[in-house]
Image (cartoon, rainbow, N blue to C red):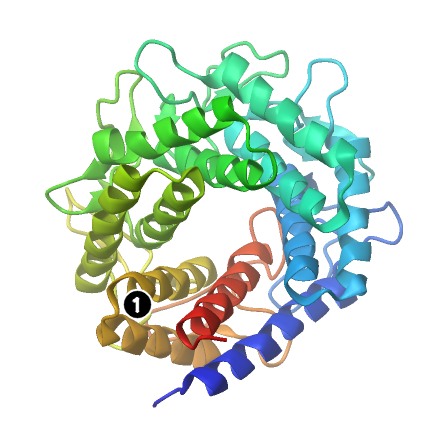
């Protein structure tokens, strides 16, 4: 199994078209507007499914980025659709920020303000501005940045608090999902605020935003990365006391390249050098601790019990491709290129649903799809896999001198 750069780029480009075609053909909500809330494993639409802001913001980012990457005007039309729906239905005109969840008709079901979701709003708005030059989208992104800094930033111990009630008061339950620990700070939220601030900084070179993004990068080596294992810790008390024992292999390899990307956009040479070391260390730790022999990435491991969850989710395979491509780019080591090829081979043979379209949510260790999971839904989205393909094609082009 050898992929020459041209062949790999060609296969990735075709798969990007397939992913976007799935979301275009099956996920438009022509009854209530925007995009449908859920399609099941067999690609059946689930009537009455709620609509989450994270999914919709990721759809906005995806079609905006796809337009910026391909210049296909059809993708900009869908980005316009996503932006208009978010602005009309998810936007809280009383207290500011984005609601968490709507019913299928666009009525508010859950009005809490999860900072993770505000971050994805920035991510989607800023990418849409790059595609459309819509000045309101830039203003929307800046507004969410200001809400995060006003309410979520911790001036005592640094970093950002997880969640707030609709009026930005402190809630009893901070959790992003029921499987998460109920703690006031998390790796995941910090990672995706960083991701969003980085994208906003590309289009709005504001000095305060640059300083905040640099400080966010600094939090990872100072508070979040375990320098003995080179994995992320996941949950924390206010003072950054670690409150978890789980290693998330997909987040490790995703975070490794996002940190490097952020440091490059901030243009801080010291940070770039430090996160370059983190990039290689975290990718190596994922390869050593979290990969199967076929190159695929396991879900997570509990370091206290030793239990390994060896299911393989769609998003971590996608992020593994990007992390490996960045490691290949920054080190020049063939081991990362070869591992990237192995992951792509696994995706092609076990992750892509050749019958019903898109990628399976997850497969077990033997590559058998888990039929109880969504094909599209509250968390199942086109952002991880489409972004991975665009990032890897870009890196291959750079390394090939194209």
Which of the two residues, 256 or 87, is positioned nearer the viewer here?
A: 256
* Identity of the residue drawn at 75% across and 37% down: 86
Task: Judge from the rendering whether residue 291 lies leftward or rightward of residue 342; answer left or right.
Answer: left
x, y percent for residue 339: 29, 74
Q: Is residue 223 visible?
A: yes
Residue 111 found in image quarter: top right
Label 1, secondary structure: give it.
Answer: helix
Residue at figure coordinates x 39%, y 77% from the top left: 346
Quarter of the view holding residue 30: bottom right
Residue 236: image location, x then y, percent = 29, 26
Q: Residue furthest right?
A: 31
Q: Which residue is mark 1?
A: 328
On the image, the x and y values in percent for residue 98 come to 66, 28
Specify whether residue 103 is in view.
no
Residue at 42 percent across and 25 percent down: it is 211
Q: Depth check: give the residue in front, 4 or 228.
A: 4
Coordinates of residue 79 in the picture (x, y in percent): 75, 51
Q: Which residue shows up at 10% across the image and 43% down it?
A: 228
Q: Residues within 10 Å of mark 1 (few under 14, many from 20)?
A: many
Q: Is residue 76 above or below residue 245?
A: below
On screen, 299 above or below 92? below
Left or right? Give the position of 54 relative to 105.
Answer: left
């Amino acid at each position: 199994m050898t992929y020459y750069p041209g062949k790999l780029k060609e296969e990735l480009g075709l798969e990007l078209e397939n992913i976007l075609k799935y979301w275009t053909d099956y996920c438009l909500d022509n009854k209530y507007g925007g995009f449908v809330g859920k399609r099941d494993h067999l690609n059946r639409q689930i009537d009455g499914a709620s609509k989450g802001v994270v999914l919709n913001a990721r759809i906005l980012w995806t079609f905006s980025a796809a337009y910026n990457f391909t210049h296909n005007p059809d993708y900009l039309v869908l980005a316009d659709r996503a932006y208009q729906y978010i602005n009309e239905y998810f936007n809280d005109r009383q207290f500011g920020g984005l609601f968490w969840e709507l019913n299928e008709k666009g009525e508010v079901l859950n009005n809490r303000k999860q900072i993770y979701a505000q971050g994805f709003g920035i991510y989607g708005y800023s990418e849409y501005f790059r595609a459309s030059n819509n000045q309101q989208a830039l203003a929307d992104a800046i507004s969410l940045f200001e809400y995060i800094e006003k309410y979520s930033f911790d001036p005592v111990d640094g970093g950002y608090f997880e969640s707030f009630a609709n009026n930005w008061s402190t809630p009893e339950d901070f959790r992003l999902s029921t499987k998460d620990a109920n703690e006031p700070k998390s790796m995941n939220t910090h990672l995706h605020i960083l991701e969003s601030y980085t994208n906003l900084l590309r289009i709005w070179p504001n000095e305060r935003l640059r300083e905040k993004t640099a400080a966010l990068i600094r939090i990872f080596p100072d508070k979040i990365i375990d320098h003995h294992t080179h994995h992320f810790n996941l949950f924390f008390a206010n003072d950054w006391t670690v409150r978890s024992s789980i290693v998330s292999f997909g987040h490790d390899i995703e975070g490794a390249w996002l940190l490097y990307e952020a440091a490059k956009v901030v243009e801080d040479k010291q940070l770039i050098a430090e996160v370059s070391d983190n990039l290689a260390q975290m990718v190596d730790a994922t390869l050593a601790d979290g990969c199967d022999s076929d190159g695929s990435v396991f879900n997570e491991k509990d370091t206290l019990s030793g239990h390994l969850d060896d299911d393989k989710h769609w998003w971590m395979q996608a992020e593994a491709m990007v992390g490996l491509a960045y490691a290949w780019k920054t080190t020049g080591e063939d081991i990362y290129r070869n591992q990237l090829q192995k992951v792509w081979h696994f995706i092609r043979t076990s992750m892509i649903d050749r019958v019903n379209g898109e990628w399976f949510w997850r497969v077990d260790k033997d590559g058998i799809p888990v039929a109880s999971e969504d094909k599209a839904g509250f968390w199942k989205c086109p952002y991880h896999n489409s972004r991975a393909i665009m990032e890897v094609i870009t890196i291959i082009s750079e390394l090939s001198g194209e």
